[in-house]
Every structure is written in structure tokens, then in C-alpha cells.
Image: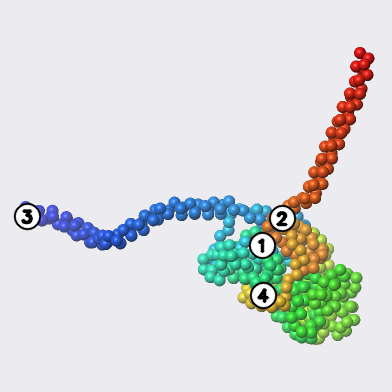
């Protein structure tokens, strides 16, 4: 190779390297000064704001870690003491299609009383948080949620888990509260009114000039069913309840209140309506289901939706279960055909896959509320600490309407000013009495010492 060839070969890599670098430099050519200045500003801004963002994120993380909220937990099957108030740590975050709700009120249902004894199969095994309905305020929304916003007041439906201060649920399981509806009313409406509506309208096909028997007419479902019957003209309502509740349920729309504790309700109904009834709603089970079927007119409908006769004490009663099972109603298809009667069963807990139907019914009920045709009756409210008292009141059937649980802590009642003054006066009197006694003792001591001084 000649010297010239060698020099050319040595310069070729340098030329190639320069060719590779030049396009890159051309791509990164400086822009006009004004744009360059704005770019430099935009580059320095994140650096200035970065510590602030990090501080905010750190603050949110600390809040999520240190946040705690109250929840009721069924720790085992048995008496009222099995439902305990506990604290959960960590702020739950809504996922895609979910919302976080700060709960203001929760509904207590008969299903939770059964669940406490292990008699409600739709409630998962303990430890578990009960609660199928609540109301509150939306605190946060997850990705993809369009029709709910932070601050919305909503009522919530779920299979369980709603007896908490904070819950995360699917957004489509929340429903905006109508204007004027209280949180207690919102928590009282869903389960009872959906149950009553679907039995009467979807199954019972209630129409004017029909007659209906409503057992436990002073309970949540009973009052809901009565109000819904009153939305149809000329419906005769028979309602069973203890005598002390008759005036209230009669004012609420029951045509014929019957005291089931002192009278045979079937005989009383036959006296008023010898041909029988068009619809019977049976939450009792056992032998009462047979009586209900016998009360039906031809073309009448019996709707079984509970087994309250199995619940006879704080804990599971095997004798009551055996008695209810032994007396359960059975009928052959042929006998049913010959009787020209219909027997239906309703269990809201098994309609999980029919949520669009449930949502439609609830929207109808909220519209009826807006029109003033239905309104939940609140019997009483109890704080989470008082859940045992709430369950006892409902299980002993002392309630007239819905029993509500409140997540917020119960405030200690301050002493009345009069009590404080009276207590202060008593303390002052005691102090004065002590001083008087001490004064008298000193005087007696002085008197006792005087003769000794004279003698000396």
C-alpha cells in the first residue's frame, strides 16, 4: 500500500464518525431565543415543584397508613355479644368503577339477626362485617366513574360489609338521594321496600279491589308493604301486630289490625272476609305457611319470603329449627293445580345476578318517595357501640319501623348545669360541716384544758 492510500484509509473512519455526529447535531439545533427561554423555564419549574409534589404524596401516604375507621364485625355465631366494634387501619382506595363512601347511617335487617346465629346462608362465615344497606357521602371516585362525584349523597346496596364508617363499593351500586331525604331514611329504604315492591307488584300482581295479609305489619317490610298497597286504590290490608302497635299501623294504612298474640289471626280474617284473601305475604314459615295457603281465595297468591319462626332467642334454638322443619309446608303439583292457587318464594339475597332489575325497582321507589307516596318510618337509631341493644329491640319485636345504626361515636352527655351547681353546693355544705365539727372539737379541747391550768 502506498503512503497516499494509507493516509486515505486513516481519514475514512474520521469522516464516517463526523457524518454520524452531524445529523444528531442538526436534530438538536438551537431554536429561537424566545422559545429557548420558555423551554428553560418549563424545565426548571418541575424542579422547583418537585419537593412540593413529593411532600403532598408523602402526606397522602401517611394519611392512608395512619387512617383508622370503625367497623362492626361478626366474630362468631351466637348471642348479641358476637357482633363487636373494631378499628380498621388504612384508608381504602377505590379501584376502577368504584367509589369510596363515608357512611352516615346503616340499616338493620332481619337477615342480620339470622346471620348472627348462622341461619342466613348468604352471609359469609365469621369473621365478617354484616350490612346490606347504608347511606353516606362520596369521598373519592375511581377511574372510569362518570356519574358520581365527590360530595354526592348516596344510598348504597351490597351483599354484606356495609356496617363501617368507610366503604368502597361499585359505583353502580350507589343511588343519588332525593332532595329532602335524610341519611336515616336513605338507609331504611332499599332492602325493605325493594322486597315489598317485588313481592306485591312483580309476583303478586296487585290491583285495585284486592285483599292482602301482611304479617309483622309494624316491621320494616310490613310498613313498606302497607304504604305500597296504599298506592293502589281500594286495596284491603290485614296486618298482624301486637295490640300496642295497632293504632300506629292503622294510621299507616292497615285496614284490619289483628293481635296475633291473643287471637287466631286466621279465624279473625275469616270473620271479616269469609272467602279468604288474594295475596298473603309470609315471613314466618313453619305451620303459618299452611295457614296462609288455606286463607287464599281461588286464584290467590302466597309469597313466602322468610322463616322468622326459627328465631326464638339470642342463640340458635335446635328445638325451634326442628319444629319449623317438621311443620314446613309441602304440596304436590297436582294438588296445587286442583286448588287454583299460586305459591311463590322470594329471597332478595339470591338475586345477585339480576342487579339491573333491582336497580330499576329502586329507581321506581325513589320516584315514589319524591311524589310523597312512600316514606320510611324510623323507629330508633343506635350508635355502633349499641348494636347489641339495636338487635335486641328488633329481635324482641319492640320496633315500629326501621332500626338504624349510626357509625359515628356516641357523644358523652355533659352534666346539666343544675346538676353541677347542686353537686358544688353539696360539696360546700360538706366542707362547712367538716369545719364546724373541727371547730367544736377544738372548743371542747380548750374547755378540757382550762381546769388543769387553774389547778396548777
Q: Nearer the viewer, residue 89 or 351?
A: 89
- Residue at horizontal 26%, vertical 60%? 30
Q: How far apart are marks 2 and 3 (CA)?
A: 100 Å
Residue 19: where, in percent of width, then height? Answer: 19, 60
- Residue at horizontal 71%, vertical 55%? 410
Within 10 Å of the Cα at label 2, are there few (<14), some (14-19), or many (20+) other Cα atoms? few
Report the residue marked by disc 1: 104
Q: Which of 398 and 77 is in front in this view?
A: 398
N-term-proximal mark, 1 vs 3:
3
N-term-proximal mark, 1 vs 2:
1
Instruction: Specify the label residue 366 is tagged with.
Output: 4
Report the residue marked by disc 2: 410
Q: Quadrant of residue 108?
A: bottom right
- Residue at horizontal 40%, vertical 53%? 48
Report the residue marked by disc 3: 4
Residue 291: where, in percent of width, then height? Answer: 84, 76
Q: How far apart are marks 1 and 2 (CA)?
A: 13 Å
Select label 1 or label 3 by which is in front: 1
N-term-proximal mark, 2 vs 3:
3
Kindly state the secondary structure of the residue where label 3 is placed.
Answer: helix
Q: Is residue 432 above or below residue 448?
A: below
Extreme residue toward the top, this view: 456
**Viewed as shown, does residue 56 lie left or right of 324?**
left
Within 10 Å of the Cα at label 4, are there few (<14), some (14-19), or many (20+) other Cα atoms? many
Select label 2 or label 3 by which is in front: 2
Residue 398: where, in percent of width, then height? Answer: 82, 64
Q: Quadrant of residue 113?
A: bottom right
Q: Nearer the viewer, residue 380 or 96?
A: 380
Q: Colour scheme in the image?
A: rainbow
Amino acid at each position: 500500500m502506498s503512503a497516499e492510500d494509507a493516509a486515505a484509509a486513516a481519514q475514512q473512519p474520521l469522516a464516517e464518525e463526523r457524518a454520524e455526529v452531524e445529523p444528531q447535531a442538526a436534530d438538536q439545533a438551537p431554536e429561537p431565543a424566545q422559545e429557548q427561554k420558555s423551554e428553560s423555564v418549563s424545565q426548571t419549574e418541575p424542579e422547583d415543584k418537585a419537593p412540593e409534589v413529593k411532600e403532598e404524596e408523602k402526606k397522602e401516604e401517611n394519611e392512608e397508613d395512619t387512617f383508622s375507621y370503625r367497623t362492626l364485625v361478626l366474630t362468631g355465631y351466637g348471642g348479641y355479644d358476637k357482633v363487636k366494634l373494631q378499628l380498621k387501619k388504612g384508608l381504602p382506595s377505590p379501584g376502577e368503577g368504584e367509589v369510596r363512601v363515608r357512611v352516615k347511617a346503616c340499616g338493620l335487617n332481619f337477615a342480620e339477626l339470622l346471620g348472627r346465629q348462622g341461619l342466613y346462608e348468604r352471609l359469609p362465615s365469621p369473621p365478617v362485617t354484616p350490612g346490606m344497606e347504608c347511606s353516606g357521602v362520596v369521598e373519592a371516585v375511581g377511574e372510569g366513574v362518570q356519574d358520581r362525584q365527590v360530595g354526592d349523597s348516596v344510598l348504597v346496596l351490597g351483599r354484606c360489609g356495609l356496617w363501617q364508617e368507610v366503604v368502597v363499593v361499585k359505583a353502580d351500586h350507589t343511588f343519588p338521594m332525593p332532595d329532602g331525604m335524610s341519611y336515616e331514611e336513605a338507609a331504611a329504604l332499599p332492602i325493605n321496600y325493594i322486597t315489598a315492591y317485588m313481592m306485591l307488584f312483580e309476583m303478586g300482581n296487585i290491583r285495585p279491589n284486592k285483599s292482602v295479609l301482611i304479617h309483622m305489619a309494624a316491621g320494616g317490610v310490613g310498613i313498606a308493604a302497607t304504604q305500597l298497597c296504599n298506592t293502589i286504590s281500594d286495596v284491603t290490608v290485614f296486618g298482624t301486630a301486637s295490640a300496642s302497635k295497632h293504632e300506629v299501623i292503622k294510621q299507616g294504612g292497615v285496614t284490619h289490625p289483628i293481635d296475633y298474640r291473643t287471637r287466631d289471626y286466621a279465624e279473625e280474617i275469616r270473620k271479616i272476609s269469609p272467602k279468604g284473601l288474594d295475596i298473603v305475604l309470609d315471613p314466618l314459615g313453619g305451620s303459618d305457611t299452611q295457614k296462609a295457603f288455606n286463607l287464599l281465595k281461588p286464584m290467590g297468591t302466597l309469597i313466602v319470603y322468610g322463616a322468622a319462626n326459627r328465631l326464638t332467642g339470642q342463640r340458635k334454638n335446635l328445638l325451634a329449627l326442628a319444629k319449623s322443619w317438621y311443620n314446613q309446608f309441602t304440596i304436590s303439583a297436582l294438588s296445587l293445580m286442583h286448588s287454583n292457587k299460586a305459591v311463590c318464594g322470594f329471597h332478595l339475597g339470591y338475586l345477585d345476578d339480576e342487579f339491573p332489575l333491582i336497580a330499576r325497582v329502586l329507581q321506581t321507589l325513589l320516584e315514589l318517595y319524591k311524589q310523597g307516596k312512600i316514606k320510611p318510618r324510623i323507629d330508633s337509631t343506635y350508635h355502633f357501640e349499641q348494636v347489641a341493644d339495636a338487635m335486641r329491640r328488633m329481635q324482641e319485636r319492640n320496633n315500629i319501623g326501621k332500626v338504624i345504626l349510626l357509625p359515628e361515636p356516641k357523644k358523652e352527655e355533659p352534666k346539666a348545669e343544675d346538676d353541677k351547681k347542686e353537686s358544688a353546693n353539696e360539696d360546700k355544705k360538706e366542707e362547712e360541716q367538716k369545719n364546724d365539727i373541727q371547730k367544736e372539737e377544738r372548743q371542747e379541747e380548750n374547755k378540757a384544758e382550762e381546769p388543769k391550768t387553774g389547778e396548777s
